[in-house]
Amino acid sequence: MNFGLFTIHYSLFTEMQKYVIIAAGGIGARMKSPIPKQYLSVNDVPIIIHTINKFQFAIPGIKIVIVLPPDRINSWEQFCFENDFVFNQDICAGGETRFHSIKNGLESIHGHALVAIHDAVRPLITVALIQDIFKHAEANGNAVPAIKMDQTIRVLEDGKSKAVDRNNYRIIQTPQCFHADILRKAYQQDYDVSFTDDATVVERTGAVINLIEGDINNIKITTQQDMLVAETLIASGF
């Protein structure tokens, strides 16, 4: 089956080489599937291919680094061959945690560059948002998409719950994009369990994280309900 990419005849952001590290280490436990969720199909196309295609369409010439568990590298190469999915990629073995996996992926990136890190199972990212994130990161050192909370939330303190102002909180998404030298410096730190995303790692170095408006549809597919949302949106031409 051929999942050919879109053709585009113009270039964007020519001053710095652009990379995206695709974190593809999910196992699909919450999906209750024997197949890792990034390989599940949405409208006959595997999720990870939807995701990669979006980046190649948004940024022509972008270089793609796929980070996989070591025992899945051969199966990924076979998967690409069987699906006639040919593109310029570097494949890296992941590590014990997401932190170590991204650190390994950074070893494939050299020189002055912009680097985005994205979850393989966020295929509903829009081309416009990808371009906006790279533009803001190039100008400001980093850019992290975030959306406002639309539900009432409470915080737990000493076994008790307390109401908080939801306007002071944001839900963080990927891709998170940084100048490569900022990321390299951040990932020289020792691992900490509080490092839940790349912005957290970078912030520990003293850098200010720049939030930009994300997209409510840019969900991370983790459940069967998420699959239904993705199928509906992609079928509608999203």
Image: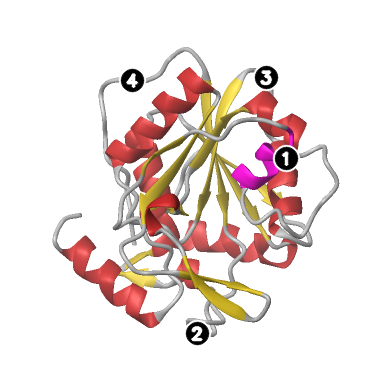
Residue corresponding to mark 2: 33
Under tag 4, what secondary structure? loop
Amino acid type, label 3: Gly
Q: Determine if residue 40 is in view.
A: yes
Residue corresponding to mark 4: 11
> From the viewer's perspective, is the residue at label 2 or at label 1 nearer?
1
Amino acid type, label 1: Arg
Mark positioned earlier in the residue sequence (3 or 1):
3
Under tag 3, what secondary structure? loop
Residue at left offset 69%, top offset 35%: 108
Residue 178 location, x and y as percent? Answer: 57, 31
Magenta-highlighted residues: 198-205
Amino acid type, label 2: Ser
Mark positioned earlier in the residue sequence (3 or 2):
2
Residue at left offset 61%, top offset 66%: 75
Q: Residue furthest top?
A: 15
Q: Is 210 part of what is drawn in magenta?
A: no
Mark positioned earlier in the residue sequence (2 or 1):
2
Mark positioned earlier in the residue sequence (3 or 4):
4
In this picture, residue 98 sits left or right of residue 3: right
Q: Which mark is residue 204?
A: 1
In this picture, residue 141 sits left or right of residue 1: right
